[in-house]
Image (cartoon, rainbow, N blue to C red):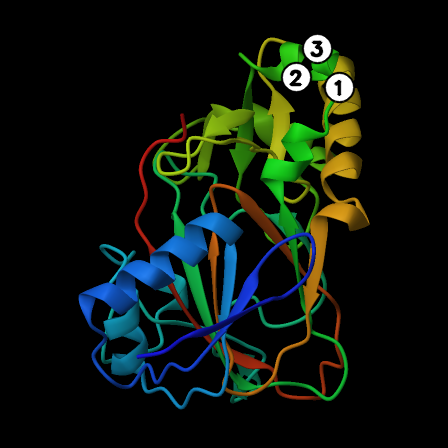
Amino acid sequence: MSLAISPLSPAIGVKINGLDLKLKLGADTIDEIKHHWHQHGVICIPNQILSESDQIQFGEYFGELVTTLGEYKISTSHSSIMYVTNEKENGKYVGALPDGEMFFHSDMCYVEKPSMATILYAINIPSVGGNTVFANMYKAYETLSPEVKSKIQSLKAVNSYEPGEKATMNVSRIKEPSGASARRFSHPMVCTHPVTGKKALYVNRLMTETVEDLSNEKSQELLEFLFDHQESKQFTYEHCWQVGDLVMWDNRCVLHARQDFNAQELRKLRRITIKGDRIR
């Protein structure tokens, strides 16, 4: 199978044409896809017509799938399927994260072993808005000053699950009792990718609450500086979805954010994620 590779942007990502993901892929093709994914952080495979089982088949090339949180289970065919949609039944949303803007974040960064990859497939797309913006955390780290790199190299930050709001605006949640339902975990602020060996900045505006071992004032000052830096246009690519796009990104070195859209228009994407290891 001959693949045509083209950049999505100077900052991050490639588009891969020449694939039909309904077909079972050979080992060489899978290795080539993995290579481009590792090198570029984001891959877009357009013009796909995929069932739930087709998307599951593709995801399993990369590892074990994550089971969807109970409140977001919709699919009866597989426990790892989640629909990101603003569909309603009987006046209630039936999917996850239905509408509105979402700040930059890394999926599942609030658990001990975050998802290493997210795979999103576009089924219905609004006429305007709802784009996903990706940010390259290798470049964000590389362009920090030596002083800042030295300062954050050994620090950890607390990440917490509270979709739709900036974590740093909710510092009172730090005082909540820990437990199985807390959905909070501390990770290094600088991580080393287990495949590429490159360092990436591992904090994000949506879910990073506070820096361990710093005062609240110093913590918020440092985080706001890093958030502004990592969201710079020089590190980002805005993906304007087309029906049939399958986009896969590496949560260990890529952040993503969602732009707002008209809630009266249907936006429906199917998501699966791949299990990862501890951030190191």
Residue at horizontal 71 percent and vertical 47 percent from the top: 235
Residue topped by disc 3: 215
Per the image, label 3 sits on a secondary structure element best described as loop
Of the two numbered discs 3 and 2 on the same chain, state the one appearing first in sequence.
Answer: 2
Is 228 left or right of 267, judged from the image as shown?
right
Asked whether residue 212 is in view, the answer is: yes
Give the image location of residue 221, x and y in percent. 80, 21
Of the two numbered discs 1 and 3 on the same chain, state the one appearing first in sequence.
Answer: 1
Give the image location of residue 119, x and y in percent. 42, 65
Amino acid identity at mark 2: Lys
Of labels 1 and 3, the one closer to you: 1
Of labels 3 and 2, the one closer to you: 2
Q: Residues within 10 Å of mark 2 (few under 14, many from 20)?
A: some
Amino acid identity at mark 1: Ser
Q: Do the residues under discs 1 and 2 have CB atoms within 8 angstroms?
A: yes
Residue 156 vertical placement versus 273 (above, below): above
Q: Residues within 10 Å of mark 1 (few under 14, many from 20)?
A: few
Per the image, label 2 sits on a secondary structure element best described as helix
- Quarter of the picture containing the N terminus is bottom left
Nearest the eye: 71 or 127: 127
**Residue located farthest toward the front when viewing the structure as drawn:** 2
Numbered disc total: 3
Cα separation, mark 1 vs mark 3, equals 22 Å
Residue 211 vertical placement versus 142 (above, below): above
Cα separation, mark 3 vs mark 2, equals 19 Å
Per the image, label 1 sits on a secondary structure element best described as loop
Residue at horizontal 79 percent and vertical 28 percent from the top: 225
Nearest the eye: 198 or 97: 198
- Quarter of the picture containing the C terminus is top left
Question: Where residue 145 is drawn, which disc sits there?
Answer: 1
Residue at horizontal 71 percent and vertical 34 percent from the top: 168
